Amino acid sequence: MIMNVLGAMMHPVERYSRYREERNKPKTFSRKHQRYSCCIVGRLEFPDRGFYIDGSVMEISLGGTLFRACSTYMIDRRLEQVRVHFDKHCMRGQIMNIRPEGYGIRFLDPLAEDDLLPLADAFGLQEANEFH
């Protein structure tokens, strides 16, 4: 029994070498949905607060959007429930991150692919491959 326990324990040198291998592996990240660059005039509504911000949708995917406010001042409202109004859509979502480019918003109910095609035709969506 003791031999099984001792055999299961890793030698410190082996543990350190495995740690170094894992640390040097490149970090990979893949998005769930393809993002598309665009510029669609819209509005970001904060229903619980009773106000909205004019701006534009700069990127869109089935799962979310990047909304850029017209003002240079960014309100830190991370994790707040919002509604994004653009074109003929009103999508409920949650602010997941805030960066200089805008608010990263995850849709609570994903956008349907059938809704993305008319947007591509009307606004000329381009695949966005860069990662921010």
Image (tube, rainbow, N blue to C red):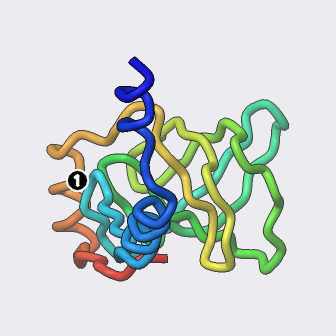
Above or below for 46 versus 99:
above
Pick the residue in front: 33 or 60: 33
Q: Residue drawn at (43%, 49%), measured in percent from left and top?
A: 10
Q: Tell me: 110 left or right of 53.
A: left
List x then y, in percent, for residue 96: 61, 50
Pick the residue in front: 123 or 16: 16
List x then y, in percent, for residue 1: 39, 17
Q: Residue drawn at (56%, 64%), measured in percent from left and top?
A: 67
Pick the residue in front: 14 or 41: 14
Pick the residue in front: 41 or 97: 97
Displayed quadrant of residue 73: bottom right
Displayed quadrant of residue 122: bottom left
Query: What crowding class fits label 1: few (fewer than 14 Cα within 10 Å), some (14-19), or many (20 or more)?
Result: some
Q: Tell me: 30 left or right of 20.
A: left
Q: Residue furthest top?
A: 1
List x then y, in percent, for residue 115: 23, 46
Q: Residue drawn at (31%, 65%), measured in percent from left and top?
A: 35
Displayed quadrant of residue 82: top right
Report the label total.
Answer: 1
Above or below for 77 versus 91:
below
Q: Residue drawn at (43%, 28%), measured in percent from left and top?
A: 5
What element does badge 1 sit on?
Answer: helix
The kind of residue on which mark 1 rests is Leu
Instruction: Name the residue carrying label 1.
Output: 116
Q: Tell me: 76 left or right of 67.
A: right
